[in-house]
């Protein structure tokens, strides 16, 4: 797919491609899907967090003192997995960003309307200085975009700038990408693949099937 969106990053390298190949293959067992998905999510999160502000600090090594850069400690970092499949990102996110807060949101898709149905929300928190909040919403699949846009609204309604919000997904569909940017043109999307289309049931083709079922062995 030719990338026509300024705020869409399609992460491409051999390890990403190998991991995608593994999670897509119908004969890959649950353990194989999980391992490949975790490897993939770590790469995606490294790319997504390039927007975090840094500050200069002076540290002392075993040899000398010097000035270097680190993530600004005055910001609030939120990882917001969409349950249940988005949980696969959590362990990697906590390893990479131990200072982050995890704000789970839970929803399932109504198979008739393809709209998300909420059942869990840990986002209602006070926001003192919205510009200092950086949010990463994680979900393996960006299909219709309905779930992701609903979660983005939770954060923009608190005044957090779109530029500070990033959706992180493994596999996406053109329809979902277009939907997100039509409502929130300044958010960022980090994905590993943009597939062909959605089928009549709203599943990404070629995709990987139901990500939650394959990750949690509930087929």
Image (spheres, rainbow, N blue to C red):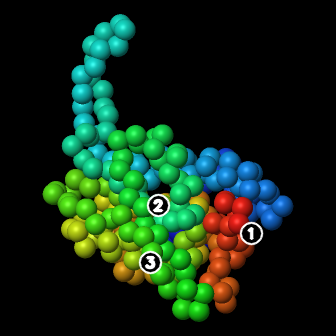
**Furthest residue toward right:** 27
Q: Nearer the viewer, mark 2 or mark 1?
A: 1
**Furthest residue toward top:** 63
Numbered label attached to residue 219: 1
Residue at point 55%, 81% (across, down): 109
Q: Secondary structure at mark 3?
A: strand
Label 2 vs 1, first from the N-terminus:
2
Q: Residues within 10 Å of mark 3 (few under 14, many from 20)?
A: few
Residue wearing tag 3? 118
Label 3 vs 1, first from the N-terminus:
3
Q: Residues under labels 2 and 1: Cα distance?
A: 21 Å
Q: State the image coordinates of residue 3 (x, y, percent, origin top left).
A: 53, 69
Count all numbered tags in the image, as a single digit.
3
Q: Quadrant of the C terminus?
A: bottom right
Q: Quadrant of the N terminus?
A: bottom right
Residue wearing tag 2? 81
Numbered label attached to residue 23: none
Q: Residues within 10 Å of mark 2 (few under 14, many from 20)?
A: many
Q: Is residue 122 visible?
A: yes
**Furthest residue toward front:** 119
Residue at point 43%, 67% (across, down): 105
Q: Residues under labels 3 and 2: Cα distance?
A: 13 Å
Q: Residues under labels 3 and 1: Cα distance?
A: 22 Å
Q: Secondary structure at mark 1?
A: loop
**Furthest residue toward bottom:** 112
Depicted 49 relative to depicted 176: above or below: above
- Between 187 and 28, the one nearer to me in the picture: 28
Residue at point 62%, 84% (across, down): 202
Residue at point 35%, 13% (across, down): 61
Q: State the image coordinates of residue 179 (x, y, percent, origin top left).
A: 46, 81
139 left or right of 152 in image:
right
Q: State the image coordinates of residue 59 (x, y, percent, origin top left).
A: 28, 19
């Amino acid at each position: 797919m030719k990338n026509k969106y300024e705020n869409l990053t399609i992460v491409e390298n051999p390890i990403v491609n190998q991991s995608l190949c593994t999670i897509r293959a119908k004969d890959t067992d649950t353990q194989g899907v999980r391992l490949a998905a975790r490897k993939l999510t770590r790469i995606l999160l490294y790319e997504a967090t390039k927007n975090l502000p840094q500050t200069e600090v002076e540290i002392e090594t075993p040899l000398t003192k010097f000035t270097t850069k680190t993530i600004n400690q005055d910001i609030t970092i939120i990882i917001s997995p969409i349950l249940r499949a988005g949980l696969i990102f959590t362990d990697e996110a906590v390893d990479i960003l131990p200072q982050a807060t995890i704000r789970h949101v839970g929803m399932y898709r109504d198979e008739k309307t393809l709209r998300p149905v909420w059942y869990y929300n840990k986002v209602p928190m006070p926001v003192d200085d919205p510009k200092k909040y950086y949010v990463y919403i994680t979900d393996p699949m960006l299909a219709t975009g309905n779930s992701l846009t609903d979660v983005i609204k939770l954060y923009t309604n608190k005044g957090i700038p779109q530029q500070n919000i990033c959706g992180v997904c493994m596999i996406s569909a053109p329809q979902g990408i277009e939907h997100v940017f039509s409502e929130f043109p300044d958010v960022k999307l980090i994905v590993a693949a943009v597939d062909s289309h959605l089928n009549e049931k709203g599943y990404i083709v070629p995709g990987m099937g139901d990500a939650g079922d394959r990750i949690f062995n509930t087929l």
